[in-house]
Image: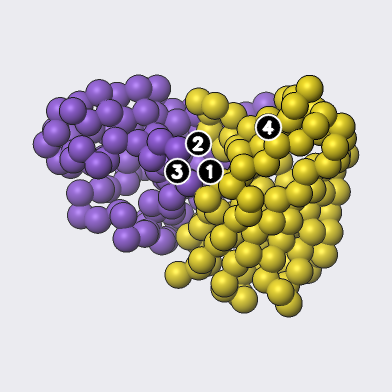
Chain colours: A yellow, B purple
Amino acid sequence: GENVEQHPSTLSVQEGDSAVIKCTYSDSASNYFPWYKQELGKGPQLIIDIRSNVGEKKDQRIAVTLNKTAKHFSLHITETQPEDSAVYFCATPTGNQFYFGTGTSLTVIP
Amino acid sequence: EPEVTQTPSHQVTQMGQEVILRCVPISNHLYFYWYRQILGQKVEFLVSFYNNEISEKSEIFDDQFSVERPDGSNFTLKIRSTKLEDSAMYFCASSEAGYTQYFGPGTRLTVL
């Protein structure tokens, strides 16, 4: 099955700085790469996703980049705010089975 | 905005008992999923369901687990004989086309 690795496991940034989280995957046939934000006691919430025919996608302060050759994709959050503090998960499917990364706990320090 | 709902929010059961976790997916979605998350760990895929049948299942989804869509709105996960290690958060998700998934708030299952 797919092997998804996510780094770092924890990340602390000052408010206003940027945060970058990276995931690598093993299945070269993967074609969909979502990122989820999970706040304490809640379900994962999709924040951005990218398909394999696109290299980068932006939505306001959030962007995802994809490098299919190297089999990695990254989440970029600019101008971080305290409300960005949460656990972030990457994921990718093989067939209809989704594999999640191990999560990154992001803390934005005011 | 439509959302996935799950009941109950917390279920406590004795080891060996059967539990049924319920989900109401978003109404026009065609793909349904169950995931579990042990406290502090990553989200793990259990099963996907499309066109009234299981399309994929993980190694975790053994004979103790089953899913059903008993009517046009509910999607259920049944655990026949719960074990201590089944204690986790269980999330339901639904998708319109098999990509973008929307998760419910989860059911916390505690097996004593």
Chain under disc 2: B
Chain under disc 1: B
Mark 4 against mark 1, which lies toward the viewer? 4
- Give the percent coordinates (x, y) of residue A5: 57, 60
Direction from residue A85 to residue A79 in the image, left or right: right
Label 4 – label 1 distance at C-alpha:
29 Å
Inspect this view and state whether residue B23 appears: no
Identify residue for label 2.
B25
Q: Which mark is residue B41?
A: 3
- Give the percent coordinates (x, y) of residue A61: 85, 39
Q: Residues within 10 Å of mark 2 (few under 14, many from 20)?
A: many
Q: Residues within 10 Å of mark 1 (few under 14, many from 20)?
A: many
Label 3 – label 2 distance at C-alpha:
24 Å
Mark 4 against mark 2, which lies toward the viewer? 4
Identify residue for label 1.
B94
Inspect this view and state whether residue A23 appears: yes
Q: Is residue B32 above or below residue B74?
A: below
Identify residue for label 4.
A107
Badge 2 amino acid: Pro
- Give the percent coordinates (x, y) of residue B56: 41, 61
Kindly indicate the quadrant of the structure image that contains residue B110. top left
Mark 3 against mark 2, which lies toward the viewer? 3
Residue most toward the left?
A: B16
Q: Do badges 3 and 2 share one subunit? A: yes
Label 4 – label 2 distance at C-alpha:
32 Å
Which quadrant would the N terminus of chain A be assigned to in this image?
Answer: bottom left
